Amino acid sequence: LWLSKLPQNWRYAPVLVWYLLIFWVGVISIGTSVIIKWTFIGKRKPGPVNMSTWRICLDWAADWHFKASMGIFFTFFQNSRICNIILMMHGMDTDFISKFQPVIFLPSKLDLVSVRRSFISRVSFDVQNEGLYRHLNIIQSSVGLGVYLAANSLEISGIVVPPFTRV
């Protein structure tokens, strides 16, 4: 449909077609990921965990699709605030000032994470502990590489967490 409107006699026309094709597959895949998240998982709130086999499979499916989609999309928008918008669409409470790697946050955990005016490097975190979902709140902080954020109702506010520590 739109392919006929592109310049056909241009030297790089085939490259442009493939670039646009991959870009649009990424956009559609992210949209599908948002639909899968809200259909399979819905909104999670802190409280008791219901971890049936069915719930584990649905979480895995939504998380896997998100990682696969972000792999394509991340190629184009790696350091962009568009990633913040994508995580907002998946349910994360964040702003446009915060900077982080979007692939560390999975749709099955996003409703339980708030990030405001912060920088987060490549970290790992858990929002489930002792049969309860917990909320993770990071405000005006910098979290270093390799930090593990434990699953307690945790609020990190106005501090710098050094690399390779456990909080």
Image: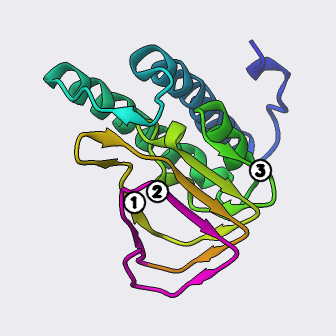
Magenta-span inclusion, residue 149: yes
Which badge, 1 or 3, is on the more N-terminal residue?
Answer: 3
Specify whether 8 is left or right of 63. Answer: right
Tell me residue 3's x, y (percent): 74, 22
Q: Residue at the location (79% across, 31% down)?
A: 8
Which badge, 3 or 2, is on the more N-terminal residue?
Answer: 3
Query: 164 or 114: nearer the eye?
Result: 114
Circle 1 Cα neighbour tier, 10 Å, few/some/many (<14 / 14–19 / ≥20)? some
Magenta stretch: give its range. 146-167
Query: 115 or 47: nearer the eye?
Result: 47
Tell me residue 14's x, y (percent): 66, 39
Which badge, 2 or 1, is on the more N-terminal residue?
Answer: 2
Q: Residue at the location (39% across, 85% down)?
A: 164
Distance CA(mark 1)–CA(mark 3): 20 Å
Residue 159 falls in image quadrant: bottom right
Q: Evaluate whether residue 13 shows in this view.
A: yes
Q: Amino acid at mark 1?
A: Phe
Q: Evaluate whether residue 15 shows in this view.
A: no
3 vs 2, front mark: 3
Q: Amino acid at mark 2?
A: Ile
Query: 128 or 122: nearer the eye?
Result: 128
2 vs 1, front mark: 1
Distance CA(mark 2)–CA(mark 1): 9 Å
Q: Which residue is mark 3?
A: 95
Q: Which residue is mark 1?
A: 125
Residue placed farthest to the left in the image?
Answer: 53
- Badge 1 marks a residue whose secondary structure is strand
Q: Which residue is mark 2?
A: 104
Tell me residue 162's x, y (percent): 51, 87
Circle 3 Cα neighbour tier, 10 Å, few/some/many (<14 / 14–19 / ≥20)? some
- Badge 2 marks a residue whose secondary structure is helix
Tell me residue 56's x, y (percent): 22, 30
